[in-house]
Image (cartoon, grey):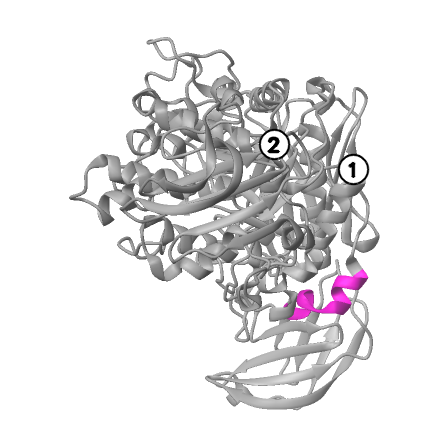
Amino acid sequence: MISSERNFLAYLDEMKIIAILLPLSYYQGMSATFSISDGIKTQPLKILEKRRIENNNKYVCQLADEISFGKVYWIMDEHGGKTDLQIGAVIRTELFDKKYYYDGDDLGAKCTETYTQFKLWAPTATQVKVKLRQPQGPYAEIVKMKRHDRGVWSAIVHRDLDYHHYTFLVLVNQVWQEAVDPYATAVSVNGERGVIVKLEKTARPKIPLPELENPVDAIIYETHIRDFTIHPNSGVRHKGLYLGAGEIDTKRKEGDVTGLSYLKDLGITHIEFLPFHDFAGVNELEAKKEYNWGYNPVHFNAPDGSYATDPTDPYSRIKELKQLIDQVHYKGLKVIMDVVYNHVYSRENSPFEKIVPGYYFRHNEFGMPSNGTGVGNDIASERKMVRKFILDSIRFWLEEYHIDGFRFDLMGILDVETMSEVRKMCDRLAKGILLIGEGWNLNTPLPLDKKAIIQNQSKLPTIAQFNDKFRDTIKGSTFNLFDKGYAFGNEHHYEAAADLIAGSVGVLKKENKLFNEPSQTVNYVECHDNHTMWDKLLACYRTEDESIRIKYHLLATALVILSQGVPFLHSGQEFFRTKQGEGNSYRSPDFINQMDWNRKSRYINSVQYIKGLIEIRKKLSCFRLRTAEEIRSSMKQSPLHAPLITFVYQNKNGEYREVILAINPRKNEEIISLPEGEWYVLADHYEAGISMSKRISGGEIKIQPISINIFAKK
């Protein structure tokens, strides 16, 4: 740092525009001339504008020629004062983005038996070095890097550096910063350094799975790697770890199945794991003492060590995560990775900010970091090298770990073009990759028409979005604990509920349309966020008998499974998961967050009921129609008095040709009329399943309070 030599400050704000701030305490903030020098050549600057800003005079000056990034420049005034030229807002201009965009696929560290290569994009740096350490070595080796076109720096060390730790030393604006490689694929304990690894040592063949023909064929089950197995009676050996989540044929001590084998039996198709890329909030050396959901991203391309058997071994987390994914695939299920590209845990300490200060994050009109995420920073996905990083990272997880889909946390922070490019790349690499995201409209400085939000769903036709209207209409407001939705007996939501069940495509009322196609809506009433539905019911119906709460809960969950769109279940929802009333458990202890496998046994009838509904959805194509046009032609609402909802479906595949869904959210029996003929009862208030043998004749029938009913005719 050379602040002692600075008489004033100067910033490069555009390719040919320099902003100079002269304090009023320095020659009254006055200078008639300014010049710029690179130590060899000196040129005058043209003063375009001067204005007062607090205790400074700001001069806007023009360069005759663009500067060469990677060199140190000095600004001089008429009094003989000088300052180094700081890289300012220029890095957020389109010209900078265009000039320094690098399309190579070789950023990061590559290790072979004879050499190790390092490449880093750092266009505003004037010097870059790589700092190497042996895993247990006390001394560091410093290797200078050479600058190339597009602001890429490289170095080659003619040795096999497998297992070595490394960081980059970057000099920007006369300040040295030490940073972990943003492209690091392995990190040391708690992500303090990058680690050089040979990923080919962890390679394994990809397990073939049936292609996902349409997103509506998916049934997503969201869980957290630790929650899934940490319970004392999970029957899992490696509790809370990658290996534990991948164990098969695990059982409670009473003998009933748990874990991965249980999910296979339940009938879901995709397991969505909360973030497992490296995150802050848990000391990996004492992982059991702390808990975190994982939405504190630090390193995007390296697995977190808190789920590994040995976080000190950089290969442990890689191999064990791959083993988990393979085990899921062996069971015929697919893996969705929850990714958090919208922010970082700490902007100031992130590799992005240390290596190219100010580039990777959005800034508001005052030049301050924006905060649409609510955690202090928003990733600027619209910038070319940020978009490239996201695309490179997604490709890495697809190719290296065989991921089958991605859930984008706070996707509304990201831009439409980036998400469209993600979709295109996934389609090039594999068929049937599922992309879903949270399309909330957040307060980030991005034009509304460029945000990847629900309002722009027509620009993202093959990316599904979490349907918060479905959630709040069926269950009741997530943010008002005592608000009740349609499935909880609130008759005012009758009309909206019917349109949501029909795929949110405006079949019944055009003004209720949210999406163009059913494959765009992720239908859910519960996820890791906020209160579980069971805890909400305990608040809404504290004095009611438990049997009533069970009925409301099953009705809401049934509507998730049977509505047009993509069904999404929270782990343990099928056995009334509770977090003891905790509404934000992102760092609560295990006894709050764990999946209580004893509840699965206690509420086994509910589990079997949900399993039966899943089976019905998978067997009857009428509950997963692929287009809005199919919904209009194959699904008709029957006139019934509110709040009962009845739909009649034409089922084009299978033995049943006509299907009726009847929904009664009221606390009393209701009478409906079935068309003439013999009807199979596939679901009622008590049980559900495609092979149920109960039959009834057409005419007036009673349907039980707070129930869904499915009748099918061959």
- The x, y position of residue 559, in whole percent, is 46, 44
Query: In the rendered view, does 489 fall on the left or right side of 656?
Result: left
Across and down, in percent, residue 475 comes to 37, 50
Q: Hey, what amino acid is under mark 2?
A: Lys
**Bounds of the magenta span?**
88-99
The reply to whether residue 84 is visible in this rendering is no
- Checking the image for residue 714, the label placed there is 2
Q: Which residue is mark 1?
A: 429
In this view, the residue in front, 514 or 340, is 514
Callout 2: 10 Å neighbours few (<14), some, many (20+)? Answer: few
CA separation, marks 2 and 1? 42 Å
Q: Nearer the viewer, residue 518 or 278?
A: 518
- Residue at 59% in and 32% down: 618
Q: Secondary structure at mark 1?
A: helix
Which quadrant holds residue 480? bottom left
Q: Nearer the viewer, mark 2 or mark 1?
A: 2
Residue 397 visible: yes
Confirm whether the magenta stretch covers residue 98.
yes
> Is the residue marked by circle 1 packed among few (<14), some (14-19), or many (20+) residues within 10 Å?
few
